[in-house]
Amino acid sequence: MTEAKIQRFRQLGLITVAAVYCLILIAGAVRATGSGMGCPDWPTCFGQWIPPTSESQLPANYQQIYADRGYAETEFNATKTWIEYTNRLVGVLIGILIFLTMLSSRHFRREDSMVFTLSVFAFFAVVFQGWLGSRVVASNLNPGMITLHMLLAQLIVAVLIWAVMRSQRQVISGKGMDNLPKSFKTVLTVVMVMTVIQLVMGTQVREAIDIIARSDDTRSAWIEQLPLIFLVHRSFSSLILFSNLWLVWQVCKHIAAPHPMRRFAIGLAGLIVSTILIGVIMDRLHIPAFFQPFHLWFASLILGVQITIYLFLRYGLQQHDKMPNQTAPIKEPLTVGM
């Protein structure tokens, strides 16, 4: 397998990861603006492949037509329609990118079949995600379906990161890895589980907000009506903060500055602090719609960075163990981006 083919796979993989994160942000905007039913049918939008820009382009009785089909809240709103349509277009783009990534991964079948397996899994997960998106629309935005849709997106991006990191495990440097505390890997694993739990609790809070918003449009009263899980979610953020900062401190203390793992650790600290600040703003300003998608987006990026650091550690330690028997030095690690 040539270096050019390896580089092509990594580049496609990283572009696809970035596209998935863009989709997570757009999906958050769809939910925050109430645009989920901007296109009341699927895969078309108001029966058209290119959605209308004004109500005059629709039949006079279009609301009754969609009400008879079981769709609620179908009053046309051009802004909401095009927000949802953009969400769908990005989803199609991701489908194309991940298909190309899977094709590019075939070159790894002999040398490292796991890269190919992960890429194939990600492709079929995206296909399932597309089908699940149609079910979300058909369910009239059932909160549980929306949460499942979001969690599957987190799984897809995690698998893609794993595939990209796996493809370059031979060039990930193990320098300084053995200096990290023995407990570092265990703590990092626990912190990743905590982040997933926090994400799930956040989606539960979001579901509660959706339910409250349907009967009360006074934002200033929403927080008071939220269930106990909101208080748990808010308090749990302190534990998330300090545990992640401990990880960042250990990486900065033991890993040399040129290593990408150190840069990811610093980025992790920035994301953690930013996410908590956005959470405080949402609490104080009565959950403004503008900040809601960024809160979820930053939380998703945190999990992705944690996974990347974990894989740097895993493959870096493997290379460190091999060093005594190597006759050639390990190349400098490539920079892996989100």
Image: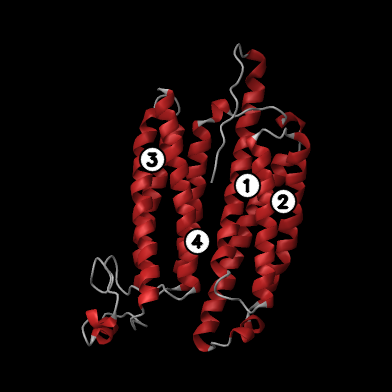
Q: Residue at x 63, y 61 (%)?
A: 198
Q: Residue at x 73, y 40 (%)?
A: 251
Who is closer to the viewer here, 57 or 228? Answer: 57
Query: Disc 3 or 1, which lies upstream in sequence?
Result: 3
Question: Dot 1, how many residues are within 10 Å of its Cα: few (below 14), some (14-19), or many (20+)?
Answer: many
Question: Secondary structure under badge 3?
Answer: helix
Which amino acid, mark 2?
A: Asn
- Dividing the picture into quadrants, the one containing residue 286 is bottom right
The residue under label 1 is 306
Which amino acid, mark 1?
A: Gln
Query: Disc 1 or 2, which lies upstream in sequence?
Result: 2
> As drawn, is 205 to the left or to the right of 16?
right
| C-alpha span from label 3 to label 1 | 23 Å
Q: Residue at x 40, y 51 (%)?
A: 125
| C-alpha span from label 1 to label 2 | 9 Å
Q: Which mark is residue 261?
A: none
The residue under label 4 is 25
Residue 233 spot, x, y in % from top left: 67, 67
| C-alpha span from label 3 to label 2 | 31 Å
